[in-house]
Amino acid sequence: MNMENSTTAFYRPTRIRTVLVANRGEIAVRVIRAAQELGMRAVVVVSDADRESLAARMADEAVHIGSSHAVKSYLNPAAVLAAARQCGADAVHPGYGFLSENADFAAQVEAAGLIFVGPTSQVIATMGDKARARETAQRADVPTVPGSAGIVSSLDEAREVAARIGYPIMIKAAAGGGGRGIRVAHDAAQLDAELPLAQREAQAAFGDGGVYLERFIARARHIEVQVLGDGNDVIHLFERECSLQRRRQKILEEAPSPSLTPQLRAELCASAARLAKQVGYRSAGTLEYLFDETRGEFYFIEMNTRIQVEHPVTEAITGVDLVREMLRIADGEPLRFSQSDIVLRGAALECRINAEDPLQDFRPNPGRVEELVWPTGPGVRVDSLLYPGYVVPPFYDSLLAKLIVHDENRAAAIERLARALRELHIGGLKTTAPLHRALVADDDVRAARYHTNYLETWMAAWRESREAASIAAQATNAVAGSTSAREAS
């Protein structure tokens, strides 16, 4: 090794000296770490509730932007931009959620002369509208779920589409996301009832009442492809399987998908890169697909124009730090990898550990972290916002940590995850860790025999078995106590 090269700084930013992290929680911590590794100054915005957060402690500076309610802080573009001016930021990284896919916010960042760490506002607007995204995919010769050509404007039009593609159908909000704004109609009468309700709900939730129709695939698998682009070139970093969902919210993810053949994987990933290239995609993004296992067909459904919660499993199987690459691309660097550089190695899984009680219908359980033991060892990673004594606030998403494992194959990775979950301990809060421990022990999960509706049924049976075991234990204790009392008398 050349001694001069070995002592040279890893990276010298050219345009981004200071990046404002416009988010909170584990993703804020994740972005701060990546920025600081690149020699950038990382400043994080904080609400009243997050003044003592791990992100605030780790950042070079924390700027207060408002009260604990997100609409008055993290969802307030004016407050975020004021913070950027205050700290002299060159760029804004939105993380995921909050303002990350808000095209108007991205445009305001651009108009302020700042760098938005993500795609352009125009691309966000195009791909963030599901109907427009479908049209774009069709132009790129990417298969989409059979459905309406765009937004349906009337009930008569909806009936015609439904008659053509067949029931059941999904009514989806064009501006929706995160599993919200979706209804299913199983016949014409239900369509008549559900369509106006879906339009009103979409208007109330997203400020846009547009809806479109798609064929409903009852036992679909949810597969998404990670892409990375610089505005000119685009590569894919293989796929993730996200079919284990509760109310369309992901619970456990893995990469690569165990349901794809090598040929299908190549076709799926190539279609994602082709679509992203057509729109001149810049930064990290994810294209989501439904895979109809019975037909062996995949369909594009939407694009997330931001970093995903589950990005670490892709980092594990490819060795690419996606957040760092986002920052380098935003700093003006061209894409550093060709497609042939991206090699799939092993398998990875991620558990989302939330402050929720899975036995009480996932009731949120904020509070103080009394004890904290993270699993360690080869192939184990934890992305978290916790530290001992931290008080989890009740105002935001309940995600506490992501437990990620990687190993040489899927079977080994599952065993590693089971071991890591046994080591995990978060005292003072009820979390979803018991659910994950049971899930990774399930025969169907281990054999990858699951789909997007699988978890709902599985959880109902799991809760019943837990409740039965608890009642039996209470009865045993009661009998033992009664026997002891009689013996004592």
Image (spheres, grey):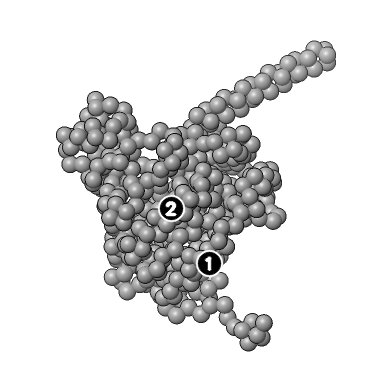
Provide the secondary structure element on which disc 1 rests: helix
Location of residue 95 with respect to 213 vertically, above or below: below
List x then y, in percent, for residue 287.
40, 53
* Residue corresponding to mark 2: 267
Q: Tell me the distance, in whole angstroms, between the alpha carbons under discs 1 and 2.
A: 18 Å
Q: Nearer the viewer, residue 301 or 60?
A: 301
* Residue corresponding to mark 1: 341
Does residue 305 appear to the left or right of 313 in the view shown? left
Decide: few, some or many residues near mark 1? Use Cα within 10 Å; few <14, some 14-19, many ≥20: few
Residue type at the position of mark 1: Asp
List x then y, in percent, for residue 24.
47, 57
Residue type at the position of mark 2: Glu
Provide the secondary structure element on which disc 2 rests: helix
Identify the residue shown where x is 37% and y is 48%: 300
Sequence-first disc among 1 and 2: 2
Identify the residue shown where x is 67% and y is 82%: 1
